[in-house]
């Protein structure tokens, strides 16, 4: 009923290797690459063009259609992935900190933080460190928080569920429904104010493998099973 009206706008970057930083990806001053030399397509923005359709699913295989089009036009591409935000991570973590306190951190993480941080900062809790303005730009603080925050982000993505048993993170639910695999967490991949506020600067790559999309979709929509890389699963088990 909306002929010639765009519904979804997918932005794609053609690059070498899986992107791990959105600021680098969007740097307008960076040299323009040759599409023929790219081996990876990165989906970095998926926008609903119609306000009235906000919240409505427009198809379980949206990204697969984009992948199929790119594969036909640029057959030299080998990898199709996203560089995606984790918009609910900090809100979830901010609730967990007062409830779980020091139990959120593993003994090895507390020991590493004590070694990496000055004494006055080492005495502070996780919430206090995250409350510091531009904590991510303070090298000792960023180093100390890297391991625990990546582990907690993996926990949030893989184990925290809605009452219906789906991942709490809406972006994760979208890509898993489309047949993706959770592939890699990227530390300080978005240090914009919004990126730090929403996800402590962490972003995730969702990987779309053409021969796995259908199976991943069926496993997730039918059984709630999440496809994830071994490296991501190890973060939860550590």
Image (cartoon, rainbow, N blue to C red):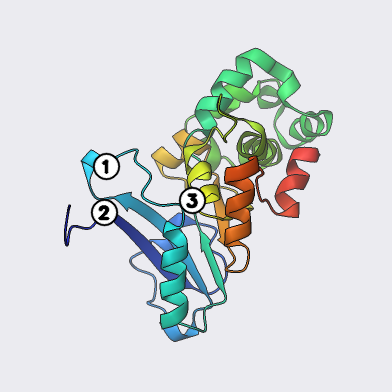
Spatial distance from mark 3 to mark 1, Cα to Cα? Answer: 21 Å
Say which element carries label 2.
loop
Nearest to the observer: residue 84 or residue 226:
226
Whether label 2 touches label 1, CB < 8 Å = yes
**Lower position in the chain sequence, tag 3 or tag 1:** 1
Nearest to the observer: residue 158 or residue 221:
221
Picture coordinates of residue 115, whole percent (x, y): 78, 35
Q: Which residue is mark 3?
A: 84
Residue drawn at (74%, 33%) of the image: 113
Q: Which residue is mark 2?
A: 7
Q: How many marks?
A: 3
Say which element carries label 1.
helix
Which disc is residue 53 wearing?
Answer: 1
Residue drawn at (46%, 57%) of the image: 61
Spatial distance from mark 2 to mark 3, Cα to Cα? Answer: 20 Å
Specify few, some or many for label 3: CA neighbours under 10 Å numbering under 14, 14-19, or 20 or more.
many
Nearest to the observer: residue 34 or residue 62:
62
Picture coordinates of residue 19, whole percent (x, y): 53, 63
| 3 or 1: mark nearer the eye | 1
Displayed quadrant of residue 39: bottom right
Displayed quadrant of residue 141: top right
Query: Does residue 101 appear to the left or right of 199 in the view shown?
Result: right
């Amino acid at each position: 009923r909306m002929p010639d009206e765009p519904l979804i706008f997918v932005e794609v970057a053609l690059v070498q290797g899986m992107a791990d930083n959105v600021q680098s990806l969007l740097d307008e001053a960076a040299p323009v690459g040759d599409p023929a030399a790219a081996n990876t397509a990165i989906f970095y923005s998926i926008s609903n063009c119609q306000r009235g359709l906000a919240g409505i699913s427009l198809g379980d295989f949206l990204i697969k259609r984009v992948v199929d089009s790119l594969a036909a036009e640029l057959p030299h591409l080998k990898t199709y992935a996203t560089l995606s935000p984790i918009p609910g991570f900090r809100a979830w973590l901010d609730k967990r900190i007062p409830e779980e306190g020091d139990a959120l951190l593993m003994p090895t993480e507390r020991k590493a933080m004590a070694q990496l941080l000055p004494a006055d900062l080492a005495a502070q809790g996780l919430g206090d460190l995250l409350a510091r303005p531009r904590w991510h730009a303070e090298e000792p603080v960023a180093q100390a928080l890297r391991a625990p925050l990546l582990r907690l982000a993996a926990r949030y993505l893989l184990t925290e569920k809605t009452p219906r048993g789906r991942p709490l993170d809406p972006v994760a639910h979208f890509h898993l429904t489309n047949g993706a695999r959770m592939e890699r967490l990227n530390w300080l991949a978005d240090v914009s104010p919004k990126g730090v506020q929403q996800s402590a600067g962490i972003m995730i790559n969702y990987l779309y493998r053409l021969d796995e999309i259908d199976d991943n979709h069926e496993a997730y929509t039918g059984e709630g099973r999440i496809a994830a890389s071994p490296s991501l699963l190890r973060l939860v088990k550590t």
